[in-house]
Image (cartoon, rainbow, N blue to C red):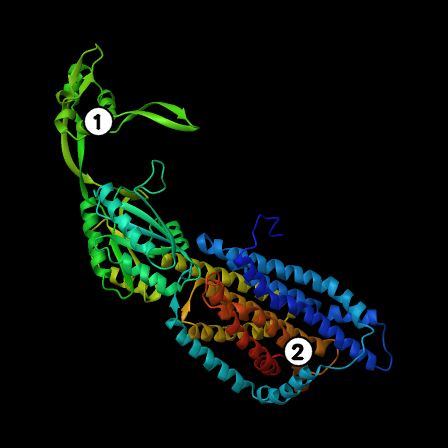
Amino acid sequence: MLHYRGGTLDTMVLAGLVIALGEVVDDAIIDVENIVRRLRLNRASASPRPAMAVVLDASLEVRSAVLYGSLIVMLVFLPVFMLQGLAGAFFRPLALAYVLAILASLVVALTVTPALSLLLLRSREDRGDARAVAELKERYRRMLPAFVDRPRTALGALAILFLLTAATAPFLGEEFLPNFREYDFLMHWVEKPGTSLEAMKRVTVRAGEELLAVPGVRNFGAHIGRAEVADEVVGPNFTELWISLDPSVDYEATVARIQSIVDGYPGLYRDLLTYLRERIKEVLTGASATIVVRVYGPDLGRLQSQAQSVSAAIADVEGVVDLKVQAQVLVPQIQVRFRSDRGALFGLTPGAVRRPVSTLVQGTKVGEFYEEQRLFDVVVWGVPEVRRNLDAIRSLQVPLANGAAVPLESVSDVFVSSVPNEITRENGSRRIDVTANVRGRDLGAVARDVQARLSGVAFERGYYAAVLGEYAERQASTNRLLLLALVSLAGIVLILLVDFGSIRLVGLVLVTLPFALVGAVVAAFLTGGVLSLGSLVGLVTVVGIAARNGIMLVSHYRHLEQEEGMPFGRELVMRGAEERLAPILMTALATALALVPIVLGGTRAGYEIEHPLAVVILGGLVTSTALNLFVVPSLYLRFGR
């Protein structure tokens, strides 16, 4: 399906398949375990039924639980599908792979698994539970009464644990995407506007020699200024450098060495970013910085003053590095102002004057020629001595209609004036960017401090600032994720109502869902204390797993009571929990084993996004499993009648 839609098998797709592995295994486990148990009971009965009838009834028995559980898991991922921008581009393939795997597993569980069970299990010798499973059930049988007989104590302890987790959650750091451990770096050097091409070339060549001397630097490249048709409007004072490292080197030490060389060139604005990080920043705001404070206003002079005030206010925020105000300085420029009163005496129009001046100063294309399969333009342009001589420009002869000519200074004022080197606009308003990167603190903490400092900056009427960049994108994605999560929650409630037909049972399952997040938050604290967007997607996954396990256990309780005629009470709860012990543990174990390599891999190259996601899911898996094994039986006995 992914290939049909034009997708590729990248790391995010593989992560989605790995996360779905637990549910895929669970679909088969639920069906097979129930079929094996029913075949065992059938053999022990006084009048055994045909194996086909037993297998069919056993499959139908769990069909609704498997179907509704899978639908809930797919519905939980709806918010991830609806993410926009960069967040959607990163995580939508993961969600698609996950949902497609669950859907395929559901089809197999409802069709292929019962058929294979009939072929392979109907003549299987009944050996009872495996030794390990039997020992687990024995220990579980001894531990469970302590929880089942004290539902209020269990619920109270869980509530306290949840409140403590909720109280500590705000202390988690925030980031949009992790720092990618790439071996290709992109660096910007920006000198003062007006710096010559020769000066930038000297600095770039010297820096290249120093960087190539660092062990592990494979190659170095740079370009100065921009091409004629470029995606960035920059002058000769702008240099972009590329550095590639050998993957076998000590990553942190080599990057630190390169950073020290870069910092050895004071007076330049400079940064050192991995290629993907730099591309992400430019896509978000057009500026290669983590935090962008964009100041809007009508007058360039006041706008520059307001930007300097913003820069001064946030300069001492802990974690802010590479602080820069967008360079907008006055540079000398030749101005030719047409005098319409004088031009009318000679029958001249502004266009007739502009053409010869543009040809002299800027050049005019008059033709082209081919050579060795390459196309070259033919441009008429004044020689440098004339272009740079104000008196020569004033003496330029402007042709008249009668064949005569008149000096340019006779019909225009020619002078040198100071003008801004660049003027940037957005939504009809002029703007200046104050940019900074973050180092040593999490993005969320730094961005909140920046916003707090901005609230103390006095802006004149018509001037205002907006905080953009990775933090703003993360907040937008988080808010959208939470809003759509409410829609998913409403869908989950409807599915549970259709399946259970009881508001009380629906409430029982829903109440347990937040407690599954306890382990996820604890795991995030133990691995750096930072929640990235990948971690939030992991939290969504944990909720889906907890909801699925809860609906499976409650459905089994209802089957024992409604189909097998077992009276509601302590024995029903004990038996149902014991029979679901093996499927719950096997599902959790299968998911954990799939995630352990990603967790142990850390944040090495290729694992940067999946690692925090896997950590959160693994932590949530622990508390979700414990919740279903010990707390849900206790709550069902208390509220499930």
Most foreground residue, 306 or 609: 609
* Mark 2, secondary structure of its residue: helix
Residue pictured at 66% horizontal, 75% vertical:
583
Q: Are the two marked residues, 2 and 1, in contact with CB atoms closer than 8 angstroms? A: no
Bin the neighbour count of mark 1 within 10 Å (Cα to Cα): few under 14, some 14-19, many 20 and up. Answer: few
Left or right: residue 71 versus residue 60 is left
Most foreground residue, 486 or 285: 285
Total labels: the figure holds 2
Most foreground residue, 344 or 251: 251
Where is mark 1, residue-wise?
A: 383
Most foreground residue, 207 or 600: 207
Bin the neighbour count of mark 2 within 10 Å (Cα to Cα): few under 14, some 14-19, many 20 and up. Answer: some
Left or right: residue 453 versus residue 587 is left
Mark whose residue sits in front, 2 or 1: 1
Q: Identity of the amino acid at label 2?
A: Ala
Give the percent coordinates (x, y) of residue 606: 48, 60
Residue 471 bears which disc, if any? none
| Mark 2 or mark 1: whose residue is earlier in sequence | 1
* Mark 1, secondary structure of its residue: loop
Give the percent coordinates (x, y) of residue 487: 52, 61
Give the percent coordinates (x, y) of residue 615: 49, 70
Where is mark 2, residue-wise?
A: 582
Q: Identity of the amino acid at label 1?
A: Val
Give the percent coordinates (x, y) of residue 39: 79, 76
Residue pictured at 18% horizontal, 51% vertical:
305
Q: Up-down: is 440 above or below 561?
A: above
Task: Give me the C-alpha separation between circle 2 and circle 1.
Answer: 87 Å
User: Residue lying farthest right?
Assistant: 47
Q: Up-down: is 612 above or below 410?
A: below
Q: Quadrant of residue 28?
A: bottom right
